[in-house]
Image: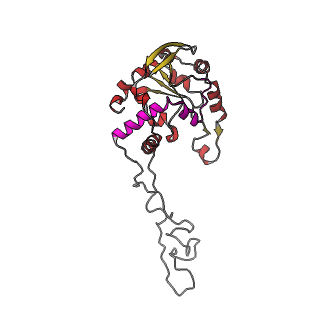
Amino acid sequence: MQAQVLDREGKEVKSIELPKVFSLKVREDLIERAFWIIFTHKLQRKGTDPLAGERTSAESRGTGLGIARMARVKGERYQRAGQAAGVAGVVKGRVAHPPKSEKVIRKRINKKERLLALAHAIASTANIELVKKRGHKVGNLKGLPLIVTSDIEELKKAKELLALIEKLGLKEEMDRAKRGMKRTSGKARRRGRAKRVPKSLLIIVNKDKGISKACGSLPGVDCVKVKDLSLLDLAPGGKGGRLTLWTEGAIKNINDNLINLPALV
């Protein structure tokens, strides 16, 4: 497969041969399965104190008193005496089914299956139908993958990167991400998740010479080095076909910096 390389002005400068991985017939089921398994690797274990709500002298008084048999705090003539305790569903009682830190939440996947899913996710970035299916606005792009010269890795300012993106015909995509931003409220906001930002353009580079800094203030735009590429970047939510901008150096170094993809193709 051949693909055109564009310069900073959006003009075609040369043609290069694409790695074999881009010719794979995409398996969306494999991408989704692998994504959610890898997603569990960044989850944090949660648990409670096993004795929470059970540090009490409460004991049932038995039958014959005309009251419920549940455990009650011992003593008399003070506020807590006689109140139900040590069981679930009462004031200051224990939680019925608390989260347990020993619960196994990390799932595992075979190495070859994970690498094959990564290969299919890379191939999905060249499938314009999958890209549109994710909701990306591709404008008048002639084809995918979208490849630019490696000198964009030196961009350090957001306005320079934004100008490049607009010259590539992706202004509508940037507007979509900006419109989709949503300010959150309540508990999510108190915990640091002040806003929700849609996933937009993914820029894959061979060497980061400052471009990641330029991506910082552009909503939904992410930058990753090809050697650090992951399904979490390529298929957010388990859906392949993320709109991706490759540099020429990243394309040439897919096989060297990632895995032996030809063996999987």
141 vs 32: above or below: above
Residue 228 point in image, percent of width and height:
41, 30
Left or right: residue 264 versus residue 25 is left
Q: Tell me, yes or no, whether the highlighted magenta stretch contains residue 114.
A: yes
Q: How is the image coloured?
A: secondary structure
Q: Residue furthest top?
A: 13
Q: Residue furthest right?
A: 179
123 vs 91: above or below: above
Residue drawn at point x = 40 percent, y = 20 percent? 252
Q: Quadrant of residue 123?
A: top left
- Start-end of magenta stretch: 111-140
Q: Tell me, yes or no, whether the highlighted magenta stretch contains residue 246.
A: no
The answer, for residue 96, to whether it is visible in the render is: yes
Q: Quadrant of residue 175?
A: top right
Q: Quadrant of the C terminus?
A: top left
Residue 227 point in image, percent of width and height:
40, 27
Q: Nearer the viewer, residue 92 or 42?
A: 42
Q: Nearer the viewer, residue 259 or 56?
A: 259
